[in-house]
Amino acid sequence: MVNDPMNAFSLPSFELDDKILMQGAEISRRLNQLRLENFPPSAKKTLRQFSVGEVAHYLGVTPSNLKRLYLDGKGPIPTTMSGNRKYYTAEQMLELRQYLAETGKSEAKRYLPQRKPGDKLQVIAVVNFKGGSGKTTTAAHLAQHLALTGHRVLAIDLDPQASLSALHGFQPELDQNPSLYDTIRYDERKPISDVILPTNFPGLDIIPANLELQEYEYDTPLAMQAGNEGKRFFTRLGKALMDVDDRYDVVIIDCPPQLGYLSLTALTASTSVLITVHPQMLDLMSMSQFLLMLGNITKTIKAAGADVRLDWLRYLITRFEPQDVPQVQMLGFMQSMLAEEILKTPMVKTTAISDAGLTKRSLYELERSNFTRGTYDRAIECMDAVNFEIQGLIHRAWGRM
């Protein structure tokens, strides 16, 4: 028998299922270890306190106004830190809003921006067909910003990969939390109120995700064959949200990076759509295919009775590098076609977001001292500009200028 000289260098075969299960379990164990280290002793996220300057920024008042309040003993009492610096908790920010609204009647709307009678619940789907576009980062920061500015917010993680859930301190395979699947499935459903959990941000609740969400993609075609309930799958989320309509002002949905039944269910329930896109040719090509597919599918479900009407649709340019000439050119190309629909402020690429993500935190959770001053200031200024612009669209949909 002639020996094959290549046999000495061949790799041993292995069972794929055993290998990936083992690796998945090890990654999960390490991530939980990090969670315990970052959020001791309960592995639950808390929230830092906010400086007078930050509180004034999100309340829309001047720092001197806040200083006058606490010197006069009015409103909640801030914590005094080193250097006589004053800090408020997020709960105290809500108390300040209430106090300012009660003592400044003519400006009550400014301090309490929630829905008024007759204003409809705003449901914003954050979507993209391609992963890596900053979709989850956008959804998380938008939801947290709206909570900090006085809105009652529900975030729904509709991506089985559960990145939005992870950013809010949840680890699906260990926490065993329910997901939206428990509410929109075709058998033994739970009320949506049973799957909503609080976050570390006052005013922001979440429906976390887990791998079970993927079952909806398999169940729906079978339900469509079985009867009318499946054929009207696109109504399931909208109907579920009616049960908590009075609890929230805005719902933010982080959709999966694919155009399946989950995404279509979310889009049909939405009043607005935010599409994230990285200014590169391949990403633009992917978005083009996404829009064509979405348009054709929307026509089909409209014919089946879906009411797909939006207050607004906007494109958010993400991970933008102003010094990158091809990206600037691509942005100009997109603006020539979609001028009115592109948000005025692109979200710049910044190490601050990726650095915050290393500890499963957002920009709003970390203090300025965690970064070099210029890096943080540029990142938070840009993030706030994006989110205040979206907030303006929400308020305009309620008839406010």
Image: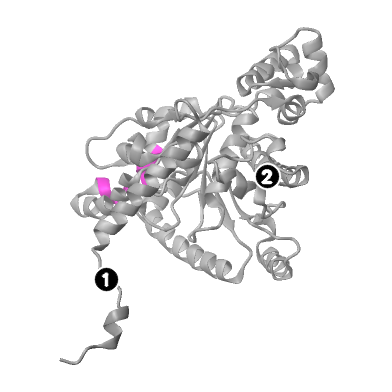
| Location of residue 190 in the rendering, given as x and y in whole percent from the top left corner | 29, 32
In the foreground, 92 or 345: 92
In the foreground, 363 or 133: 363
Horizontal arrangement in the rendering, residue 351 relative to residue 86 (left or right): left
Please give the residue where the numbered disc 1 appears in the rendered image: 12
In the foreground, 99 or 221: 99
| Location of residue 241 in the rendering, given as x and y in whole percent from the top left corner | 42, 34
* Residue at image point 30% right, 48% down: 216
Residue at far bottom of view: 2
In the foreground, 368 or 261: 368
Horizontal arrangement in the rendering, residue 328 relative to residue 170 (left or right): right
* Residue at image point 47% right, 29% down: 44
Does the magenta-highlighted stretch encompass residue 313?
no
Q: Given the image, on which type of amino acid does mark 1 rest?
A: Pro
If the image is split into quadrants, where does the C terminus sit? top right
Start-end of magenta stretch: 229-238
* Structural crowding at the residue carrying mark 1, measured as other residues with C-alpha within 10 Å and reported as few (<14), some (14–19) or many (≥20): few
In the depicted structure, whether residue 361 falls above or below residue 95: below
| Location of residue 158 in the rendering, given as x and y in whole percent from the top left corner | 42, 45
Measured Cα–Cα span from mark 2 to mark 1: 49 Å
Please give the residue where the numbered disc 2 appears in the rendered image: 383
Horizontal arrangement in the rendering, residue 94 relative to residue 193 (left or right): right
